[in-house]
Image (cartoon, helix red, strand yellow):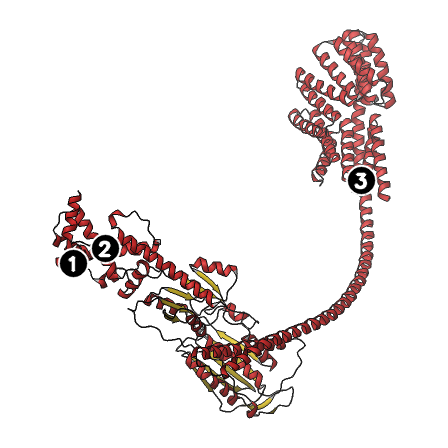
Amino acid sequence: MKDGNRLGEIVAYNELGKCYREESRFSEAIETHKKGLMLSVNLCDTLQIIQALNNIGTNYRRIGFLDEASSYHYKALSYCEAYSHKNDKKLLKSRVISLNGIGNVFLTLNNYEVADSVFRMALDGEQILGSSLGQAINYANIGAIFESKGQIDSAKHYYQFSMKFNQKAHSELGISLCHTHFGRLYEKNGELDKAIDEYRKAYNIMQFNSDTWHWIESCLSLARVYIQKGDFRTAGVYFDQAQKKAVEIHSLEHLAEIYHLEYLWYLKKGDSRKALDCLVKSREYHDSVHNEKKMMHVQNTHILYERKSKQNEISTWQENYKSEKMYSKRVTVASILVMVLACILLFSMWLIIRFRSQKNQMLKQMEQMRINFFTNITHEFRTPLTIIQSAAYDVLCRKPEDENIKRDIKDILHHKDRLLNLINQILDIAKMTSPTHTAQPDIVRGDVVEFIYMICDSYVTYAANKGIRLVYKPQQERVEMDFVPDYMMKIMQNLISNALKFSQSGSDVLVTTKAKDSSLYIYVSDSGIGMTSQQKANVFIPFYQGTNDVANIGTGIGLSLVKQVVEAMHGKIELHSAVGHGTTFVVSLPLKSKEKIPMALDKSKIARPEILVEENIFPPEDDDDDKDTIRILIIEDTPAVSHYMMRQLSPDYSFYFALTGDEGLEKARNIVPDLIITDIMMPGMDGLELCRQVRESELLNHIPVIMVTAKASSEDRLKGLEAGADAYLEKPFRADELKVRVEKLLEQRQLLRQKYSQVIETEDNTSDNTEPVLSERDKIFVAKLTDSLHCMMEKGKIDYDALAYNLCISRAQLNRKLKAITGFTTTEYILQIRIALAKHLLDTTDLPIWEVAEKCGMDNATYFGIIFKKKVGMTPLHYKKRNKNTL
């Protein structure tokens, strides 16, 4: 409300100042506008400050104080440039007014070039605002520049534009001024009648207007023209009117001009005495105007000094007041902030306590649900496993005579134990990681070295079957320690089995213990594949599986369970590993328990750990390379699965087995099988990479590949097919489906061989109109073979070993490869090529029979004739004569 009152006072000062200016009371107008400026500064109203500065500058310009006028207009312009709201119309109008004032100052100083530039900038602003009156003013100002330069036509052109926009704005003052401008131009051209007409129009418009200043200008213009025409009586009428009004408004400038015109009047009439009196009075009034300007300047300087003094006092008082007020305000704000922060803190504490209570309750509920889930799922797993075990033992107790049935029953029981062990581990880690787990295990005291030796001894045979030497070297032969047998069993079993799992055949796994500083240190080291930094950071996370050579094989439970058990015994576990340099786990456990009194270790109650050993024994392979049977290569890291596959397929097949992808690829190159069945997840090279290398191999690319895997997603199936697999089966698979897949793929290969052999037997190479039936890779192989044969035949002899060497394969591999894709053995295929070449030579040349035989790689013409007659049905001579008879 207080700011509203101040704004009203500012507006009132502005209006009052304008009234003083219209009455030519410029001193009062300047003081009034300066008061308004002070109020605007205190109120920080930028637009009002700019308006007051422009008003003060206009007043100074009207009384001839050009320096002060330009200073105030430039200050107004600088405020306009600094104002943040550049698109504000009021701001743009104020900027235009500032430019207009500056232009008038330069026009008064006869600096026409700068004045023209500033006026045109102001005109652009008025055009943007769409102000007709503003455009009229600036067109008139530009016209005044041309008039001052003596360019009458250009001045008249711009005055006409000014008249047009003044009429559009209905501005009586603007229209009157335009008539005055036109009259002045006519007067300068000597067209006095037209000048009188224009001046009279301006006089008539301003006669009843409150702007006395411009009405006096019209009167003086008419008097001046009538004096020039010699009509002194009419000129005297206008002199009297102008003089009367000038005295009323105390316009010294107008009085000076009136007496100057009277001087000219009396001078024309020849009255020199009165002319001299009028000239003296005109000079006196000019001097009075000049003195008044000086007096106003002195007065303004004094007022400015007084104002600055007052402002300094007010500023000092305001600063003291603001400091006291700011201090009081800061104290108040600080008090309020402290109270608000205290309330927020209390409310936050209440929320945290409530949230924790709810969270704890929710965790208890979730944990109970988790325990119930694992308990129920374990029960659900154990029930069918019990039935499977009972049924398997029941069949085994009947002592079946079929050895295959006995093996199947043993496999069922073995994998039942593996599944049960996995279920127990999942249940153990669920209990160990439960925040509500409070059960205290039974702690015993006894010889931990003997206990660990018993565990390691149970793994020796299992390690030996894998070609690994397991060694336990304790530094002390006996160490008495408080420990939980079940926990120690879980630690050692998981660490040892993990080391054996990632070790290569022929390497060692070393287990070491030593007692030092009231702690037992257990070291389990292997020289296996090692771990990356990422694997080391995540290996103890439940269900984490690293991307190593046995990727995705396992559950990721064992090491997590070890960490939980070690921490439950208040110990620590460390891991040291590097890729290709093996892994070492270091477990430190306290020798004495601080929680409860241990019991004595009863060895009779400790059961020797039962190790589930997978028998890596395959059925005997067929060593007869010359045996003409279908060869099936099964690459599977679980021998029981390989046994099962073999029993489901025809007993007439010859079976070969491999545990890893690398071993399988090497065996495939040696035997060149008719079909490959492979798993995907295997140690070393996986099934996908194996399939890619088979497809890229010139020796093996014709072999169909069936993938059998536990990866059952559509994405995995697509990857298998992209790698080049001919079929993709999911575990567990149906035996009849595997059998049908194998038979159909072999049948397709057999059909291709038959078609190819028919093409060769029915037509020679020179008239082949039959479409090829081989794949592009097989065509390339056959083409290389045929080219090598032709080169050898030209030399006179075919060497089987050299032929295989040229194709970068062995003689047996050549025979298997050629038989697989063409249906011919190497000898049969060479014979076909020889007969085809012989036919071609007999048809196209006159060579003797013995020379044809030599060119076909046969040095015995008689034997050549026998072979030719057996294949073609006639001797070479009869065949050659038949062709001539045909011709």
Residue 101: where, in percent of width, then height? 73, 29
Residue plotted at (23% across, 61% down):
827
Tell us which disc is closer to us: 2 or 1: 1
Rendered position, 396 above or below 873: below
Q: Mark 1 or mark 2, which is nearer the start of the sequence? A: 2
Residue 767: where, in percent of width, then height? 26, 47
Element type where label 2 sits in the image: helix
Using the rendered image of the protein, determine whether residue 693 is visible from the camera's viewpoint.
no
Mark 2 vs mark 1, CA separation in Å:
16 Å
Using the rendered image of the protein, determine whether residue 490 is visible from the camera's viewpoint.
yes
Amino acid type, residue under disc 2 in the picture: Ile
Amino acid type, residue under disc 3 in the picture: Ser
Q: Nearer the viewer, residue 780 or 427?
A: 780
Tell us which disc is closer to us: 3 or 1: 1
Tell me the number on the disc at residue 866. 1
Q: Nearer the viewer, residue 201 or 382?
A: 382
Residue 761, image quadrant = bottom left
Q: Mark 1 or mark 3, which is nearer the start of the sequence? A: 3
